[in-house]
């Protein structure tokens, strides 16, 4: 069997394109699992098996629901009794797929005795910022040569490693490739493009939320995207700087999701980074700063914020602003 998994929610524009890309696949999955954790429910029109975890986003207490939602899909597969040789395709809701993507993944998987296969290099287009970037995992001194999750598929017998990744809240693709992958299982191709900056709830990668970054190359008229995906690029022209109405109406402040309240600066190679308000710790992911602050500084701040004293022992107020609910 071929089983496709798509996690989604509050991204109607992206998911409509996802259905279009799935409908034209030359090889269709035997089952398509869609995990949707938002209200209202995402409109599904292709007979998918829809899983609805609760609590719904944004009431879920953590900003990242990917691990919870993927685990819901895994639980379903356990009950389904997925075979060791079944192929699981990660068909992400906001990315572009060529019509032969699943066919290519199937053929490569059948050709070689690998439990994990993936396409490289990773090609990304940020449609909001009108920029693109190509990651060659084999040439960037990455300690774990890997394919992005959107370009990865695996055999059923790798499920225990996927569960490990979800339970320890790791980056799923990095964990899978470190534990079960091989550089020989990475194949060159051009059948998938990671799309960043679509309207709706942002993805787990900081790339969705960042502003201009010197590591990305400008693509103001989406000519590079058109070079990659042809006339499908027309569908993305309207998304520059657009926010989904569904998220405008539903979105609530989420801990560290957009760096709000954290000082930001441009670091090495043009990377946007955020700094802890209480020490010199910085990171490119706002959520990491929030987690660091909770572990290292929240207790000393106290319920009403901390105070400090100047040289004359005059009390001065010290304001700490950290987003989210505590």
Image (cartoon, rainbow, N blue to C red):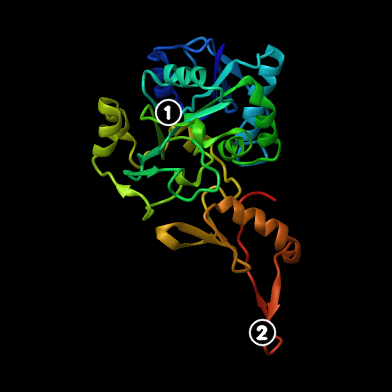
Residue 74 in the image, given as x and y percentages of width and height:
66, 23
Residue identified by numbered label 2: 310
Asked whether residue 163 appears in the rendered view, the answer is yes
Q: CA distance from mark 1 to mark 2?
A: 53 Å
Res 158 quadrant in image: top right
**Foreground: 161 or 239?**
161
Res 289 quadrant in image: bottom right
Is 42 drawn above or below residue 261 in the view shown?
Answer: above
Residue at 54%, 39% in the rendered image: 251
Labels 1, 2: front one: 1
Q: Which residue sits furthest bottom?
A: 312
Residue at 56%, 22% in the rendered image: 113
Query: Secondary structure under badge 1?
Result: helix
Residue 287 in the image, given as x and y percentages of width and height:
59, 50
Label 1 crowd (10 A; few <14 / some 14-19 / many >=20): many
Query: Secondary structure under badge 2?
Result: loop
**Foreground: 140 or 307?**
140
Residue 272 in the image, given as x and y percentages of width and height:
45, 57
**Foreground: 10 or 234?**
234
Is 258 drawn above or below residue 190 in the view shown?
Answer: below
Q: Which is more N-terminal, label 2 or label 1? A: 1
Residue identified by numbered label 1: 14
Quadrant of image for the N terminus: top right
Asked whether residue 53 appears in the rendered view, the answer is no
Res 268 quadrant in image: bottom left
**Foreground: 272 or 124?**
124
Residue 29 in the image, given as x and y percentages of width and height:
50, 13
Residue at 66%, 49% in the rendered image: 325
């Amino acid at each position: 069997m071929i089983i496709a998994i798509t996690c989604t929610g509050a991204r109607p524009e992206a998911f409509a394109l996802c259905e279009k890309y799935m409908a034209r696949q030359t090889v269709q999955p035997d089952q398509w699992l869609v995990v949707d954790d938002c209200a209202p429910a995402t409109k599904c029109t292709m007979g998918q098996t829809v899983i609805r975890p609760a609590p719904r986003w944004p009431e879920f207490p953590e900003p990242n629901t990917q691990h919870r939602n993927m685990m819901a899909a895994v639980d379903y597969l356990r009950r389904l009794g997925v075979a060791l040789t079944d192929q699981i395709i990660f068909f992400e809701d906001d990315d572009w797929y060529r019509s032969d993507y699943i066919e290519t993944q199937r053929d490569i998987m059948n050709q070689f005795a690998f439990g994990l296969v993936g396409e490289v290099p990773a090609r990304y287009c940020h449609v909001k910022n009108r920029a693109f970037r190509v990651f060659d995992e084999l040439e960037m001194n990455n300690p774990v040569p890997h394919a992005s999750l959107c370009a990865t598929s695996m055999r059923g017998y790798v499920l225990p490693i996927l569960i490990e990744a979800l339970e320890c809240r790791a980056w799923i693709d990095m964990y899978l490739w470190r534990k079960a992958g091989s550089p020989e299982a990475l194949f060159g191709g051009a059948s998938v493009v990671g799309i960043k900056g679509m309207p709706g709830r942002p993805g787990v990668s900081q790339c969705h939320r960042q502003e201009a970054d010197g590591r990305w190359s400008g693509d103001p008229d989406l000519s590079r995207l058109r070079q990659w995906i042809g006339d499908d690029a027309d569908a993305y022209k309207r998304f520059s700087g657009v926010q989904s109405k569904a998220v405008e109406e539903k979105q609530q402040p989420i801990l560290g999701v957009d760096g709000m309240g954290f000082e930001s600066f441009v670091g090495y190679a043009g990377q946007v980074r955020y700094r802890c308000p209480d020490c010199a710790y910085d990171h490119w992911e706002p959520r990491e700063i929030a987690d660091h602050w909770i572990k290292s500084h929240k207790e000393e701040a106290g319920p009403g914020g901390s105070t400090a004293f100047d040289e004359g022992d005059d009390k001065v107020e010290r304001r700490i602003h950290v987003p989210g609910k505590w």
